[in-house]
Amino acid sequence: MEPRGARTLRVVTATGPFSTRPRYRSLAVLFMLIERLKDPIGIYRRGRDKGRMLPDGLQYVSSWVDLGFDRCWQLMETDDERLLDAWIARWSDLIDFEIVPVVTSKEASERIAPRL
């Protein structure tokens, strides 16, 4: 666990035992963004004034915020990871990000079924 106030960006790529492709470029992929909110008031003010500021090709799916406004879990979808980088650059002054490629439970079951 990182200390509170750490300013790092960790990108987790899919190279583990359940991965079927090491990089994502051609198929839409889901990404769970685990956000550490540095300035919740500033984040919501910017969101109110400018919207999500998503580049074309990056889709917001859903998000959940803890009750203390310390963390947010945001699900995004894209076929180009560079769009995540562009979007993160627009918010990195207010948020620290961890990016995790994810699959649905259904897809996880299908991927692991041959190994059972």
Image (cartoon, rainbow, N blue to C red):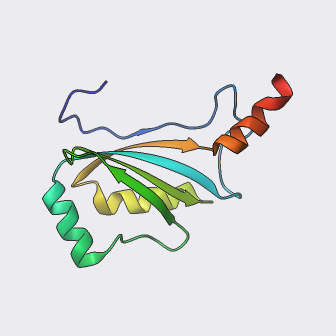
- Residue at (56%, 38%) from the top-left corner? 13
Q: Please tell me which residue lies in front, 29 or 73.
A: 73
Q: Is residue 73 above or below residue 1?
A: below
> Can you give x and y, in whole percent of width and height, for residue 1 in the image?
31, 24
Please indicate whether residue 30 sits to the left or right of residue 85 in the image.
right
Depth check: 3 or 48 in front? 48
- x 19%, y 32%: residue: 4
How many tags in the picture? 0
Whether residue 113 is situated above or below residue 65 in the rendered picture: above
**In the image, is 96 to the left or to the right of 18?**
left
Quarter of the figure with the C terminus: top right
Q: Position of residue 26 (x, y in %)?
A: 71, 58
Instruction: From the top left corner, tell me how far across and down residue 30 is, in percent.
Output: 58, 52
- Front one among 108 and 14: 108
Up the image or down, 3 lies above or below 73; here it is above
Q: Quadrant of residue 16?
A: top right
- Residue drawn at 76 percent across, 30 percent down: 112
Nearest the eye: 66 or 58: 66
Residue drawn at x 70%, y 57% is 27
- Given the current orientation, which residue lies at the most extreme right position? 114
Residue 6 location in percent, x, y? 22, 34
Image check: 71 left or right of 106?
left
Residue placed furthest toward the bottom: 49
